[in-house]
Image (tube, rainbow, N blue to C red):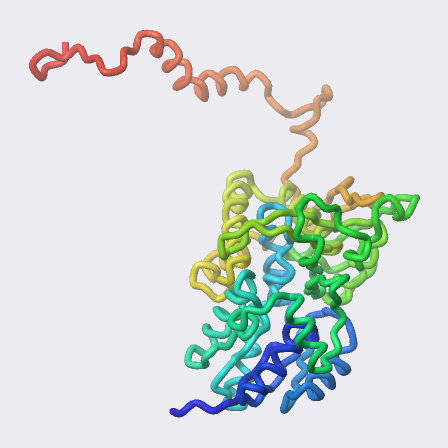
């Protein structure tokens, strides 16, 4: 079938994708801008009007906040996903959803192309393209920002030349992506890992030194591995994340400054704000420590690490990820309970935990006189547990590497 010139563009309203609309229309494409609302904020209607003004033939706005939290964030929370132990994968979680919706829209309107505004140095090009390909394998993908070889300064000049209004400037050239689960900031002075992030890089969190002077407590209620209430207040998933972002952000919780290893093989300095994600990941992990059996918990931590890498590397729709998801989901059947956290000056830590499924037995753990633990059994346990080590220790001084007491194939 002959290709048409229709292209569905993942449009954010920012510098890259705004410039892409103009660039594609100049190349003769019909641009259909798809805006996916995952809680990034801003006036999306205004951004859509801007897309039409620049040259988009039509704009589609999809409210995907509920789907994003329920179908992407909550599964990731159950797996305690943090890339390299820090990043809560906010951007990485939104991309497979966006890629799926791009493919769906392209199929719906019969477009031959899908386009995005990712660069050739970033991870998002992989995440979006793999997700789109998984749902529409015959649609061709365009990546203008990757292909045109323009620097960010040249992009700004291009935008100015064509009358495209953008928030970025040469003095504040940050590249920002945000959704309900977190906010990422890069470019500009942040590219120097020695430079402390300027105050204007942050939006969701107060600097710890100017955060509230009084600490706060918050009880987080979980059922089946996902949060359902803050204190006694039951909340829908989207509302819960929003409220927790605001609450934790006021305490300066959730700032991440890290040098991470990108999928494309380079190290990148990244700044993240993830108040709700940081709190919920800490709380969920602590609840699992209370209710999951030791071997299961240890093995799950290995699975969680691999699950995090798969998401970061754009493999959300891979068979391996599906298999790991089934295992992780099975572990959450008993992850019910309440975690109490304390917030103060950039910190949020667990101070209390409760679950009807708790494996903590005070009668066994106590050092008081009423302990049920039979300490007399410890000696025999240690004797058997350490038998191999004891045997090796006795023998090691007599061992001679490379020697053998055998003569003509028969051991003496």
Task: Check the picture and name the quadrant holding the C terminus.
Answer: top left
- Is residue 266 in view? yes
Q: Say left or right for 247 vs 197.
A: right
Q: Nearer the viewer, residue 144 or 315?
A: 144
Tell me: residue 34, above or below residue 383. Answer: below
Residue 239 lies in what quarter of the image?
bottom right
- Which residue is the extreme one toward the left? 408
The residue lying at 47 percent from left, 86 percent from top is 112
Residue 182: image quadrant is: bottom right
Q: Nearer the viewer, residue 315 or 113?
A: 113
Image position, residue 183 (x, y; %): 71, 60
Q: How many marks?
A: 0
- Image quarter hosting the N terminus: bottom left
Q: Position of residue 125 (x, y in %)?
A: 53, 67
Is residue 66 visible from the viewing direction of this image?
no
Please tell me in which quadrant of the rendered image residue 354 appears. top right
Is the residue 190 above or below the residue 18 in the image? Answer: above
| Residue 398 place in picture, x, y as percent | 31, 7
Where is residue 277? Give x, y as percent: 70, 55
Residue at image x 50%, y 65%?
126
Q: Describe residue 403's horizontal placement relative to residue 249 as left or right.
A: left
Q: Is residue 248 left or right of residue 378?
A: right
Residue at the far top in the pictured view: 398
257 shown above or below 371:
below
């Amino acid at each position: 079938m002959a290709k048409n010139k229709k292209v569905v563009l993942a449009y954010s309203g920012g510098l890259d994708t705004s410039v892409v609309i103009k660039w594609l229309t100049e190349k003769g494409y019909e641009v259909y801008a798809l805006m996916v609302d995952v809680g990034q904020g801003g006036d999306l209607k205004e951004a859509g009007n801007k897309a039409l003004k620049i040259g988009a033939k039509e704009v589609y706005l999809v409210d995907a906040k509920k789907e994003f939290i329920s179908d992407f964030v909550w599964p990731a929370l159950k797996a305690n996903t943090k890339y390299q132990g820090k990043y809560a994968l906010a951007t990485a979680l939104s991309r497979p959803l966006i890629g799926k919706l791009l493919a769906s829209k392209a199929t719906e309107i019969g477009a031959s192309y899908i386009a995005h505004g990712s660069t050739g140095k970033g991870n998002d090009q992989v995440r979006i393209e793999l997700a789109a390909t998984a749902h529409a394998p015959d649609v061709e993908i365009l990546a203008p920002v990757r292909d045109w070889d323009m620097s960010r300064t040249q992009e700004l000049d291009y935008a100015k030349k064509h009358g495209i209004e953008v928030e970025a400037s040469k003095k504040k050239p940050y590249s920002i992506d945000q959704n309900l689960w977190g906010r990422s900031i890069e470019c500009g002075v942040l590219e120097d890992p020695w430079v402390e992030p300027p105050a204007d890089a942050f939006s969701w969190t107060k600097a710890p030194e100017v955060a509230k002077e009084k600490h706060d407590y918050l009880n987080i209620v979980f059922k089946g591995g996902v949060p359902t209430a803050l204190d006694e207040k039951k909340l829908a998933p989207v509302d819960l994340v929003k409220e927790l972002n605001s609450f934790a952000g006021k305490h300066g919780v959730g700032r991440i400054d890290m040098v991470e290893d990108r999928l494309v093989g380079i190290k990148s300095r990244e700044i993240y704000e993830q108040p709700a994600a940081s709190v919920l990941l800490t709380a969920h992990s602590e609840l699992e420590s209370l209710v999951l059996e030791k071997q299961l918990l240890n093995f799950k931590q290995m699975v969680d690490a691999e699950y995090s890498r798969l998401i970061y590397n754009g493999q959300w729709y891979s068979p391996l990820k599906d298999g790991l998801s089934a295992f992780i989901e099975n572990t959450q059947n008993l992850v019910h309970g309440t975690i109490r956290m304390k917030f103060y000056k950039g910190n949020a830590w667990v101070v209390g935990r409760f679950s009807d499924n708790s494996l903590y037995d005070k009668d066994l753990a106590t050092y008081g006189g009423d302990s049920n633990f039979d300490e007399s059994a410890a000696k025999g346990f240690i004797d058997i547990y350490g038998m191999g080590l004891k045997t090796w220790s006795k023998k090691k001084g007599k061992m001679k590497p490379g020697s053998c007491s055998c003569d003509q194939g028969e051991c003496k």
